[in-house]
Image (tube, helix red, strand yellow):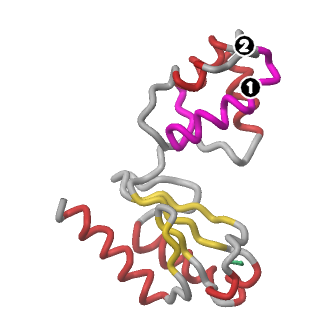
Amino acid sequence: MNELPLESIFADLTDRSRSMLIPVLQREQERSGYLSREAMVAIARELNLAPSKVFGVASFYNQFKFEAPGKFHIQVCRGTACHVKGSATLLETLERETKGCAGHTTRDGLFSIEVVACVGACSLAPVVVVNGKFHARMTDTQIRSLVSQLRQEVENE
Ligand code: FES
């Protein structure tokens, strides 16, 4: 994510054809972490497409998210090595502790949970990644204490 305005994703766009839709959607998701309704309307306007077309294409692909990520974006690896080491239970515990649900952001905006495939650190399984930081060989107890630590961080701000 970055601080640049939405317009920045159009700035160096020389081609405004329909074929640019996916790359532009990807740029916007990189910029703000998700695709808001306003952003998709602006993209439609810029590429001269119907907003319904943009919504339709974006919702077809799993890579696009339509909810703002939480302050803490937590990725739970569900690749084979992590699965064997208990990532399903970790995910359940995480959902319970955050009162969240995989694929969504909690109501308080603190946590978003994403299930991901192998993150390339199988020897550290099971792996949980919080805002890009890897947490190796996680246990149920550790994930519970991680969530309360993150809550504490927010309270101390
Ligand atoms: S399966 Fe989780 S890091 Fe490879």
User: Quarter-wise, where is residue 28 in the image?
Assistant: top right
| Disc number for residue 87 | none
**Amino acid at the residue labelled 1:** Leu
Residue labelled with disc 1: 21
Q: Is residue 22 left or right of residue 134?
A: right
Whole-percent x and y of residue 137? 55, 88
Residue labelled with disc 2: 49
Q: Secondary structure at mark 1?
A: helix
Whole-percent x and y of residue 53? 74, 21
Residue drawn where x is 38% and y is 54% of the image: 71
* CB within 8 Å, label 2 to label 1: yes
Residue drawn where x is 53% and y is 70% of the image: 129
Whole-percent x and y of residue 116? 66, 65
Determine whether 103 is above or below 146 in the image. Answer: above
Q: Is residue 104 left or right of residue 15?
A: left
For marks 2 and 1, the one nearer the N-term is: 1
Q: Which residues are magenta?
A: 17-37
Q: CA distance from mark 2 to mark 1?
A: 9 Å
Viewer-side residue, 34 vs 95? 34
Determine whether 145 is above or below 69 in the image. Answer: below
Whether 122 is among the magenta residues is no
Quadrant including the C terminus: bottom left
**Amino acid at the residue labelled 2:** Leu
Q: Residues within 10 Å of mark 1 (few under 14, many from 20)?
A: many
Whole-percent x and y of residue 115? 63, 65
Image region (quadrant) for ligand 1: bottom right
User: Quarter-wise, where is residue 30 in the image?
Assistant: top right
User: Quarter-wise, where is residue 35 in the image?
Assistant: top right
Residue drawn where x is 62% and y is 86% of the image: 124
Badge nearest the viewer, 2 or 1: 1
Viewer-side residue, 22 vs 107? 22
Q: Name the main secondary structure of what is drawn in magenta.
A: helix
